[in-house]
Amino acid sequence: DAGVIQSPRHEVTEMGQEVTLRCKPISGHDYLFWYRQTMMRGLELLIYFNNNVPIDDSGMPEDRFSAKMPNASFSTLKIQPSEPRDSAVYFCASSLGRREIDEQYFGPGTRLTVT
Amino acid sequence: GQQVMQIPQYQHVQEGEDFTTYCNSSTTLSNIQWYKQRPGGHPVFLIQLVKSGEVKKQKRLTFQFGEAKKNSSLHITATQTTDVGTYFCAGPAFNFGNEKLTFGTGTRLTIIP
């Protein structure tokens, strides 16, 4: 299995531009998670899906952030408009969801820089 | 809200020395997981602990879950350069199922050759 796939791996954009991050979870995994990692705030969960349905988006910073999962093999995280404080590494992770306790498999991340 | 703290935040050790990171949760946990993130990499699952007082070993790594299930520790014996990275504990988020994790603040380990 190729693991969790994220694109792009690096993104540099100017303040005010729209940014779209993409994720392909491991095939057969029911859960998909979006995290943001910064030095100041550590690893934060933004939103997660179960079988393509958003379950908890309480970690989404503000209305500028939105996430979708149109099918079991694809999810997007969009920031519009982007701001310099959004600069971070964004990870997508997936888990099987069939057992009581499942580990999460993380993608390589997208390093976002907003200038 | 639920907090999962780790100490120390940073640890620099000579190669061959031992290393320990401690994880403390503000709430009782049904289980705890540990992840390792290499510099520039992504978190990778190491192990999960479920039972009160449980101890598990992976070669030079020893993981322990506290009796009250609110704390955990990871001990590395005779560190090697391959141990470099940030170690995170993670527990189920309060009032959610086991699928949603709250990650600890992490301990960054650097090795002096």
Image: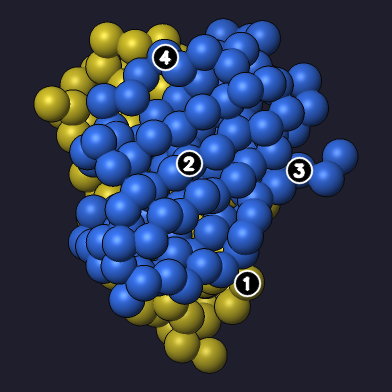
- What's the chain of the residue with tag 4? A
Secondary structure of the residue carrying tag 2 is strand
Q: Return the residue at label 1.
A: B82
Residue B13: image location, x then y, percent: 39, 78
- x, y percentage for residue A71? 68, 21
In this view, A43 is above or below A101: below
**Label 3 neighbour load within 10 Å: few <14, some 14-19, many 20+:** some
Chain coloured blue here:
A
> Counting residues from the N terminus, which is met first, the one under dot 3 or under dot 4?
3
Does dot 4 land on a helix, a strand or a loop? Answer: strand
Q: Quadrant of residue B28?
A: top left
Q: Which mark is residue A3?
A: 3
- The reply, left or right, for residue B69 in relation to residue B81 is left
Task: Please state which of the two labelled residues, at mark 3 or mark 2, is closer to the viewer.
Answer: 2
Left or right, A106 with reference to A19: right
- Which disc number belongs to residue A77? 2
Which residue is at 60% across, 45% downward? A22
Instruction: State whether residue B27 is above or below residue A77.
Output: above
B34 displayed left or right of A105: left
Q: CA distance from mark 3 to mark 2?
A: 19 Å
**Circles 1 and 4 on the same subunit:** no
Place of residue B66 in the rendered image (x, y in percent of width and height, measured from the top left): 32, 28
Tell me the yellow chain.
B
Residue A55 is labelled as 4
Dot in front, 2 or 4: 2
Please name the amino acid that badge 1 sits on: Thr
